[in-house]
Image: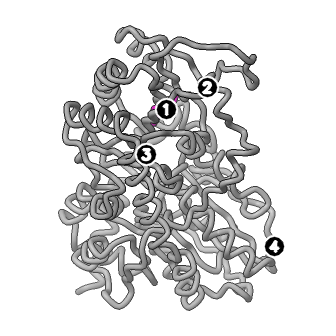
Amino acid sequence: MIRVRTEMWYGLYNALLILGFPFILCALLFKKRCRPGLLQRIGWVVPQGWSAQDHVLWVHAVSLGEVTAIVPFVTTIRQRYPALKIVVSTITETGREAVEQRLAGIATHCYLPLDYPWIVNRFINSLNPAGFLVVETELWPNLLRALSRRGIPSVILNGRLSSRSFIRYRWVRPFMRQVLANVSLGLLQSARDEQRFVELGASPDRMHHTGNMKFDLTINRDLTSRPSLRRSIFSLSEDERLIIAGSTHPAEEEILLESYRAVSHACPNVVLVLAPRHIERSGDLVEIIRSFGFPVVRRSRLPETVQSGEVRPCPRVILLDTRGELAQAYGFAYMAFVGGTLVSVGGHNLLEPSAWGKPVCFGPHTDHCQEMADLLIESRGGICVRNGQELTETLVKGVQNQDWVSHMGRNARMVIDENRGVVEKNVSLVEQVVGLCEPRPLEGKRSGYS
């Protein structure tokens, strides 16, 4: 009876996938950012370059944020097992760029196949991985099922379940119970995430709250002495201070600009750096900034060297329209704001500014980073602002009270230091489940529904 119900759910899921294929293909073709890797995603091209003797670990990280989170983990695994071939799949182009830049010489990139049985089987046959690690919350039923049927362990790494995802999955809890039965191990960010996975049907013995690996991301302090990004590029005078608003979203930027107007009246030597979550919006954002009456300079058009004595007007807004520089830019901040929190997105990485010892402001929408937000509030290294008025009051207080800002910054850094060690815990647990030393025997190819 259980087998019948299982086949019914998978049959329904695959029927919907087949009916939706023309729409999925059109979406991939018409969205410019989805076209790269299309042939790989539909299974026309599979990853190449491995032999039957190679020992492969497959890690899937959706995009830039997930790739960034796994850098210390993948680096540690490679150092411990130098003969291991590591493949990191992504869905987005920014994810591909992050793999090729941050894991160069350590891992190889491919795009994740669409979750059709015949496509995922081709990928698995090509890679023949010793194990599959999926970062955060990418639960693809056919992929996990195909891996399980081959005896290939699957691990949820740095796992989390947002409230929105949890509510959606609860509607199909019987199916999710079957999907999660194919997961060998769950290494989760918080106790809340652990509870949610168990409520969806995961085995409690397989789910473990180990913490967030982003705490182990190391900010190299030498970057400030020999960086690709320098304070001088911003044409800042010695007495000017940067407020950096990172990973911002529409509607949020208008709130920030209105707050900056009040802050600049209270303290004219403050410069605002806006780093939109999606830099493709930069052209539109330039016009929005100008509509508030502020001069705007795009980082991509700033010279790498600034003539001495060159002074730009203040107040002004610098638009950080480049990829990969925000984490380092936080090192030059006086105060920081992390976006996706004043609008119902769920928040982004609160730990990047904290790692530099910078006080962090964020809005109330922190579902994607709730544990981090709670730790920062509790330690008084971060502050939650419910609206634009509270943001303005906090920023004005900060520019007028440097001791308060310094104290908050030290507390934020302390949160990072006290929560390190997650990567080592996760590596040890993965070693117990995934055979990382010996190649798996090459199995015969399978096709169709598995």
- Does dot 3 land on a helix, a strand or a loop? helix
**Depth check: 151 or 60 in front?**
60
Label 2 and label 1: CA atoms lie apart by 10 Å
Above/below status of 107 relative to 79? above
Give the quarter of the image for residue 55. bottom right
- The residue where tag 3 is placed is 21
Label 1 and label 3: CA atoms lie apart by 48 Å
Going from the N terminus, do you reach mark 4 or mark 1 first? 4
Marking on residue 242 = 1
Write down the region rendered in magenta: 275-279
Going from the N terminus, do you reach mark 3 or mark 2 first? 3
Residue type at the position of mark 3: Phe
**C-beta proximity under 8 Å, tags 2 and 1:** yes
Residue type at the position of mark 1: Leu
**Depth check: 405 or 133 in front?**
405
Image location of residue 197, percent across then percent down: 29, 74
The reply to whether the magenta stretch includes residue 276 is yes
Image location of residue 210, percent across then percent down: 42, 79
Label 4 and label 1: CA atoms lie apart by 52 Å
